[in-house]
């Protein structure tokens, strides 16, 4: 029987790749997105599109009545700085909007598996030496990270008390085609576009801060695998959470150099004042996803950067949507 999936945030960067892969795998796909940052044209043809907020009664009714096999929850307020400026807005979308969906699943008898997009970068903080394992101490530094971690605790509650099958994926820094270069995240897309505009790359501080860059196609694949992963017994916050990254730390100067290489240009790098509070190092351990889900990243950083740069150049020539 054809399996049915709902992708919230399916007009956005990662969600649209998840929707593409689901369709290619034979799923029947619905997308809920309020287009607050996503784009209608990124929703793949073949998916049925519902322009709705995850906080709306309409979204709850859709989840209740459709009884999807899997709900991939990617819709979110993703801007860490916005969460600092307006933590209540962040909580309304990222906590309350998520609870709206979970309550709908509970009301419908908990038959829908819930795959949650959380964040390794923002929930761990810098208490543990990278690469960080799932059971490392949590120390979110922002309302955004706090909200993501709160939802993870709620998922434990819904699993224990209501039998909701929930899996959490904690992403490292995701990059690839369709990432918004105007957002706060997405240094790869920002650098690609600066190079295409023949402008300087701005590096904050000394450029030696590291991140773990994982290609969006690999992240989409992790989402699909999470639908079928055998759920480990519930045992505290981390038991059903999987880091999705590469474990490799790359610093900003190295990233600029690699993007320059794939672009065939030597970018001009300008240093600006370090951003206060910026984390120095970040990377996640992925042994649990390898063992538990049979997932490992398949795209090298150079290959992923090449695909991303080509996609942004194609966009300017009208070759990509
Ligand atoms: P994105 O902004 O491209 O996608 C988010 C989508 O959610 C957008 O299409 C937006 O329109 C939609 N949305 C926002 N608020 C909504 C609401 N109230 N109702 C319905 N739709 C709403 O961001 P992304 O980078 O694709 O992120 C997807 C998920 O992955 C998010 O949950 C994010 O927190 C998580 N994540 C991303 C990264 C990364 O590196 N990009 C890292 C860790 C976690």
Image: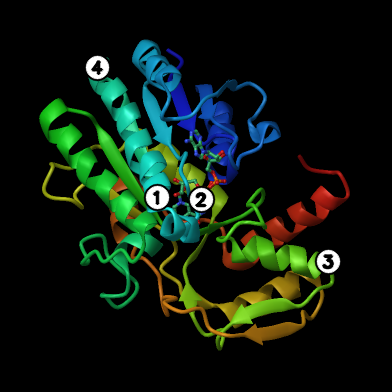
Q: Quadrant of the C terminus?
A: top right
The reply to whether discs 3 and 1 touch (Cβ–Cβ < 8 Å) is no
The residue located at (75%, 63%) in the rendering is 193
Judged left or right of residue 177, residue 82 is left
Residue picked out by circle 1: 295
Work out whether mark 3 precedes mark 4 in sequence or the reverse, and give the earlier one. Answer: 4
Q: Which mark, by number, is residue 218?
A: 2
- What is the secondary structure assignment of the residue under circle 1? loop
Mark 1 is surrounded, within 10 Å at the Cα level, by few (under 14), some (14 to 19) or many (20 or more) other residues, namely many
Q: Is mark 3 within 8 Å of ligand 1?
A: no
Residue picked out by circle 3: 197
Mark 3 is surrounded, within 10 Å at the Cα level, by few (under 14), some (14 to 19) or many (20 or more) other residues, namely few
The reply to whether discs 3 and 2 touch (Cβ–Cβ < 8 Å) is no
The reply to whether discs 2 and 4 touch (Cβ–Cβ < 8 Å) is no
Q: Quadrant of the N terminus?
A: top left
Q: Mark 2 or mark 4: which is in front?
A: 4
């Amino acid at each position: 029987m054809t399996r049915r999936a709902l992708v919230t945030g399916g007009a956005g960067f990662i969600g649209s790749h998840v929707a593409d892969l689901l369709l290619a795998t034979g799923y029947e796909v619905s997308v809920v997105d309020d287009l607050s940052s996503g784009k209608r044209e990124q929703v793949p043809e073949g998916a049925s599109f519902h322009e709705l907020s995850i906080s709306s009664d309409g979204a709850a009714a859709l989840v209740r009545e459709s009884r999807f096999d899997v709900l991939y929850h990617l819709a979110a307020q993703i801007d860490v700085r916005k969460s600092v400026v307006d933590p209540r807005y962040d909580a309304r979308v990222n906590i309350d909007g998520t609870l709206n969906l979970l309550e709908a699943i509970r009301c419908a008898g908990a038959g829908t598996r819930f795959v949650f997009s959380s964040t390794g970068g923002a929930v761990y903080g810098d208490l543990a030496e990278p690469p960080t394992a799932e059971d490392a101490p949590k120390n979110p530094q922002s309302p955004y990270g706090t909200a993501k971690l709160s939802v993870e605790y709620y998922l434990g509650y819904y699993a224990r008390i209501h039998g909701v099958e929930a899996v959490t994926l904690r992403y490292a820094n995701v990059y690839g085609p369709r990432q918004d270069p105007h957002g706060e995240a997405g240094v790869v897309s920002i650098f690609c576009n600066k190079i295409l505009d023949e402008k300087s790359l701005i590096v904050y501080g000394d450029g030696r801060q590291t991140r773990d860059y994982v290609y969006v196609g690999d992240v989409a694949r992790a989402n699909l695998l999470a639908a079928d992963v055998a759920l480990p017994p519930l045992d505290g916050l981390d038991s059903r959470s999987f880091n999705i990254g590469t474990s490799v730390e790359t610093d900003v100067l190295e990233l600029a150099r690699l993007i320059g290489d794939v672009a065939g240009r030597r970018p001009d790098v300008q240093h600006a004042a370090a951003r206060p509070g910026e984390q120095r190092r970040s990377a996640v351990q992925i042994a649990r996803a390898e063992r538990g889900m049979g997932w490992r990243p398949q795209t090298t950083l150079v290959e992923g950067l090449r695909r991303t740069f080509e996609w942004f150049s194609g966009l300017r020539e009208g070759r990509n949507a």
